[in-house]
Image (cartoon, rainbow, N blue to C red):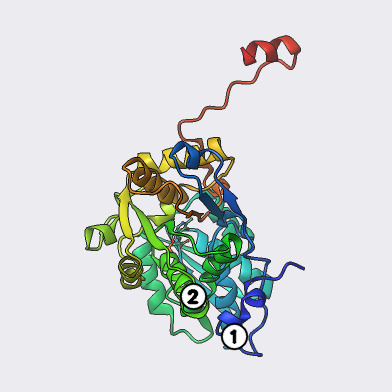
Amino acid sequence: MTPGIIERYAAWLPVTPATPLVSLGEGSTPLVTSRRIGPSLGLSRLFFKYEGLNPSGSFKDRGMALAVAKAIESGAHALICASTGNTSASASAYAASRGLKALVVLPSGGVATGKLAQALAYGALIVPVRGNFDRALEVVRALAQTPGYAVVNSINPFRIEGQKTAALEVFEQLGVAPDRVFLPVGNAGNITAYWRGFSELHEKRGASLPRMHGAQATGAAPIVKGHPVKRPRTVASAIRIGNPASWKTALAARDQSHGSIEAVTDEEILSAQRLLAREEGLLAEPASGAGVALLIRMAQTGQLRPDERIVCVLTGQGLKDPHALMRGLRLPPAVEPTEDAVRAAIG
Ligand code: F0G
């Protein structure tokens, strides 16, 4: 059996003998060497951490495994979360695996089809609300005290603890800490968790510290602007968030690491997403394209050294949002099933 993150990283996690080993086999995701994007930018050590290969198709599964284990340990019988889609898919999957109820509060019309289909298929109770993610999270916070409920958004400290294992894994895979890490920022849990992981590696193993670079979408860039955004807009629905819960710790990650949090446009996001698919064979969702877009911009403006070890985190699987994938693409019309017709179509 593939051990999950609780088993593999127990020594780094707040687990007790009473903590169940909740796992769907999360973690152990590949660190893929860039064969084309890196070299085309003059970067010889660019890697993609392909977190879309987690069991529910996103990085959320690491933190969810631990959050669900601790929820069970504390006697909860229902998981509740607000989500732009991936947290709900992950929570629903882990709830199903342990016979817990999953209640997910989603921004109506704001979640990619694949993620909705996942939550439904895993048997979650979905409550779409007429509002954005930030409103949904406010509602979930209000429901948090209900007996038997465990909130599994990244405001749950165990989500961050479990998620930090991604940094530990990158360190194992590279043999050293990277010089820079690029990732998209939405509710800002992931950047917080990576920074915690690398900071603990620094303290306990003497590892060097990477610079953390977070990317927000221009229309949903509260941290870049320095104030909440009332109506966040972006094609990358996963990071359509106007008031991130982990704002302060994201700033700490940025500043302590001498990194940056910057905005990228929807065009840059989609173009990076397409490039990943066409040039590397890596399908990622639009949000994951944001980190890559920022990397491309920094490389093109001479802000990166050629030999730096750079890790770009691909946070979610591209199949989750087929609508975004198909933008600008066209399925050719059907032809007769004959050699001639197919030859003619090939041109
Ligand atoms: N990438 C993907 C694919 C995501 O789903 C998210 C967040 C992020 C990046 C940003 O990570 O929030 O830790 O800064 N998705 C959350 C959700 C908000 O509800 O699924 P973050």
Q: Is residue 200 above or below residue 296?
A: below
Q: Is residue 27 above or below residue 313?
A: below
7 or 303, which lies in front?
Answer: 303
Mark 2 vs ligand 1: CB below 8 Å: no
Q: Amino acid at mark 1?
A: Val
In the rendered structure, the answer to whether residue 98 lies left or right of residue 41 reads: right
Count residues near mark 2 (Cα–Cα under 10 Å), then give few for <14, some for 14-19, many for 20+: few
Q: Position of residue 222 (x, y in %)?
A: 27, 60
Count residues near mark 1 (Cα–Cα under 10 Å), then give few for <14, some for 14-19, many for 20+: some
Residue displayed at 57% across by 44% down: 282
Residue displayed at 32% across by 69% down: 247
Residue displayed at 31% across by 42% down: 301
Tell me, yes or no, if residue 109 can be seen here: no
Image quadrant for the N terminus? bottom right
Q: Any mark on residue 15, and which?
A: 1
**Residue, far bottom:** 17
Q: Amino acid at mark 2?
A: Gly
Which label lies toward us, 1 or 2? 2
User: What SS does tag 2 mark?
Assistant: loop
| Label whose residue precedes the other's in the sequence (1 or 2) | 1
In the rendered structure, the answer to whether residue 201 lies left or right of residue 216 reads: right
The residue wearing badge 2 is: 206
Tell me, yes or no, if residue 327 can be seen here: yes
Q: Is residue 320 above or below residue 325?
A: below
Q: Is residue 255 above or below residue 219?
A: below
Residue displayed at 23% across by 58% down: 225
307 or 83, which lies in front?
Answer: 307
Image-quarter location of ligand 1: bottom left
